[in-house]
Amino acid sequence: MSREWDHYDVECSGCGATGSIRMWSDDWNRWGTEWDGFKGMTYVTGPKPERVECEKCGSSNPAIIRR
């Protein structure tokens, strides 16, 4: 079984905090998300800025850059 990863760098528009989002999927059509400094919802196609919040200040709509 192999697992594919997508990495995203995230920066809060309110307080400037940085973090990351790591999404994975495997051969059995399972997928998951690992959060660092932020929380919210992701879709299979990737994170949506309006659904992501900073854990420090609660601001939404951060800058999300795929690595």
Image (cartoon, grey):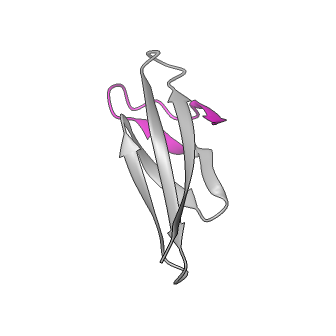
Task: Give the magenta range.
Answer: 51-67
| Residue at image coords 42%, 20% | 17
Determine the residue located farthest toward the bottom in the rendered image: 28
Q: Is residue 59 magenta?
A: yes
Instruction: Name the outermost residue toward the front.
Output: 1
* View extreme (left): residue: 56
Left or right: 37, with 11 as reference point: left
Q: Quadrant of the C terminus?
A: top right
Percent position of residue 64, x then y: 61, 34
Q: Position of residue 27 (x, y in %)?
A: 55, 79
The answer to which image quadrant residue 13 occupies is: top right
All told, the count of numbered labels is 0
Residue at the (47%, 15%) spot, across then down: 16
Q: Residue at x 46, y 30 (%)?
A: 59
Question: Residue 42, relative to residue 57: is it above or below?
Answer: below
* Residue 33 x, y percent position in the rendering: 44, 57
Quick check: 26 left or right of 19?
Answer: right
Q: Position of residue 24 (x, y in %)?
A: 50, 61
The residue that appears at 51% across and 35% down in the rendered structure is 60
Q: Quadrant of residue 38?
A: top left
Q: Is residue 15 magenta?
A: no
Task: Identify whether 36 is placed above or below 15.
Answer: below
The residue nearer to you, when weighing 65 against 26, is: 26
